[in-house]
Structures are given as C-alpha cells and as structure tokens.
Image: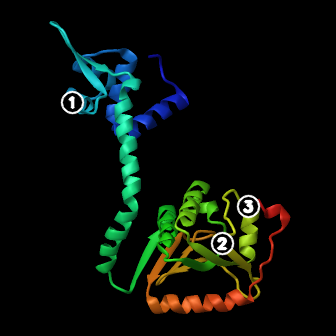
C-alpha cells in the first residue's frame, strides 16, 4: 500500500475508529498495511510504540480480526488483513447499530423513568459552554407533547447546523409541536445566520412581538414541569433548567398572555429560505 495522504488518511482513521480501534492500534494497522508483514520488534521500531505495548496491541487486533500471524521456521511475523476481509466485522457493527436503534425507545422509557423516580420534584441545574447548551436543547425532546417559549436568536449560530438538523428530525419523529414568540433581535440574527434547517409548519408555530412591548433578550423553553433559560450572544455562555411544576405553570400562563398579543408577521422575503 502506498503512502496515504491528507483527507484519505483522515477518512481511513475515522473508519478504523468506528470499527473500534484505538489510536495506537490504528497506527500499527496502517504501518503493517504500508510496510507489509513485520516482527513485533520491527513494528515497535517503525511506530515508536514500546515492544511491550506492541505485543498487547497485536493480541487485541488478532481477537478483532485485523491482523494475523505468519510463522515460519525463522521468524514470527504479523500481517494486516485486507480491508475487504473486515466485512464480517462491519456486518456485526451494522447489526449492533440496528439492535441499539430498536432497543433505544424501551431503554428511554424504562431507564429514564427509574432515574426520574429517584429525583426531587424541585431542582435547578446550571450549564456552561456549547456542549452544555446543546444538552439543554436536547432535553426539550423530553416534552410530552408541546414546547412553548421565546426565541432570542437563531440557535444554529452557536449550536451548529448539523446539531439543529438532528434535533429537528428528532422533534418531528417524536411528533412534538413547538410554539415560540420572537422579537426584533431574532429578525437581526436571520441576517447574520442564513436559514438552512427546514422547520415544517406542521411542527412549529411562531408569533412576532415588537421589542417595545417585550424585548426577548434570552432564549426560554417551557415543557412539562421545566423552564429552561439560556444565553450565548454578546456575553457569558450559560443556561439554567428549573424543575418545578408551579414555576413552569406560571411561565406557561405568561406565555399564553403574550402569545395573544403577538402577530403572525411574515419575515422579509430576503430572510426566508
């Protein structure tokens, strides 16, 4: 095998990582693929990995089917298998992925119910950073039916298009419905972050309210007994989830009052996807 360069190398490393190899195992496999069969000592010298570690790595990769022995009367060599010989492993991964997908709804129903049973009715959780806010947004998919709230700016500008596409797909698959109120700051964010995620009208309903009536300057979602507030623009990145039935009920009532004041104002044509 010739020298692997650039994007090809990244793709192969990603492929092998998905199949379960560690970084050191990938180094050994690619070295064997490029140089041909080597002894454990030669492989250690070629990779810079200690001989003791190489022996352990070889044994692990033999169990997984990535390498095989070549033994003659003089030397004990290790040989990388051809990638096409990994087909059985790939089929196992496909079967495992299908099984995980099949069992996921039952796991959510059973495990989350048990976790929730042991939690206090009232609690406050604090989050920071991009991953913290992504976690909060994903939690909204726990809604029993409807999510209501206030949209500050386009979430894609901080959480990313790919994440929001996954969230949107999950919301549609779970047959949830979202109603949100937005103000002038959201309209501004549409100019800086062009829409790419398709939010169908069958799953969403929005109303506009001028900032002179209500300046929506943070993101808020209300679902079940949870009020989630988060901010990431021009300041500290943080989020708070408040788990309390009375608090959620109060904010839901306030939302309905403001909803009646809102208008189904169409966005300017240049801001519509």
How far apart, in angstroms, are the residues tagged by discs 1 and 2?
Answer: 54 Å
3 or 2: mark nearer the eye: 2
Residue at (49, 34) in percent of width and height: 11
Q: Position of residue 231 (x, y in %)?
A: 57, 73
Residue of label 1: 59
Q: Is residue 136 above or below residue 11?
A: below
Q: Using the image as rendered, state which of residue 49 and residue 220 is in the foreground.
A: 220
Q: How is the image coloured?
A: rainbow
Residue tagged 2: 204
**Residue 260 x %, y %:** 71, 89
Which one is nearer the viewer's eye here, 110 or 245?
110
Where disc 3 sits, the SS reads: helix
Q: Is residue 44 visible?
A: no
Q: Where residue 113 appears, x then y in whole percent? A: 34, 74
Say which of 30 and 197 sits in front: 197
Q: Are marks 3 and 1 in contact (CB under 8 Å)?
A: no
- Number of the front mark, 1 or 2: 2
* Mark 3–mark 2 CB contact (< 8 Å): no
- Report the residue marked by disc 3: 192
In the image: residue 100, left or right of residue 151? left
Q: For residue 69, which quarter of the picture?
A: top left
**Which numbered disc flags the more N-terminal residue, 3 or 2?**
3
Q: Is residue 178 visible?
A: yes
Q: Quadrant of the N terminus?
A: top left
Query: Residue 151 location in percent, x, y?
Result: 65, 75
Residue drawn at 27 percent across, 17 percent down: 42
């Amino acid at each position: 095998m010739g020298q692997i360069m650039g994007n090809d190398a990244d793709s192969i490393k990603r492929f092998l990582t998905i199949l379960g190899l560690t970084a050191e195992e990938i180094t050994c496999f690619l070295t064997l693929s490029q140089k041909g069969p080597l002894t454990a000592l030669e492989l250690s010298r070629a990779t810079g990995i200690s001989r003791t570690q190489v022996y352990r790595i070889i044994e692990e990769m033999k169990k997984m089917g990535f390498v095989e022995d070549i033994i003659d009367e003089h030397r004990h060599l290790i040989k990388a298998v051809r990638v096409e010989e990994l087909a059985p492993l790939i089929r196992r991964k496909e079967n495992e992925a299908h099984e995980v997908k099949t069992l996921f709804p039952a796991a959510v129903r059973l495990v989350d119910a048990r976790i929730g049973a042991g939690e206090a009715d009232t609690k406050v959780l604090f989050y920071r950073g991009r991953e913290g806010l992504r976690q909060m947004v994903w939690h909204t998919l726990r809604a029993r039916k409807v999510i209501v709230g206030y949209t500050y700016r386009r979430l894609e500008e901080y959480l990313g298009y790919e994440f929001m596409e996954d969230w949107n797909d999950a919301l549609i698959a779970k047959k949830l419905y979202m109603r949100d109120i937005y103000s002038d700051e959201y309209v501004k964010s549409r100019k800086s972050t062009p829409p790419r995620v398709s939010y169908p009208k069958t799953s969403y309903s929005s109303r506009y309210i001028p900032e002179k009536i209500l300046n929506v300057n943070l993101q808020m979602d209300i679902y079940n007994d949870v009020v989630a507030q988060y901010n990431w623009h021009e300041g500290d990145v943080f989020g708070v989830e408040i788990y309390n039935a009375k608090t959620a009920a109060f904010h839901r009532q306030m939302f309905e009052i403001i909803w009646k004041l809102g208008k189904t104002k169409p966005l300017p044509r240049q801001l519509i996807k």
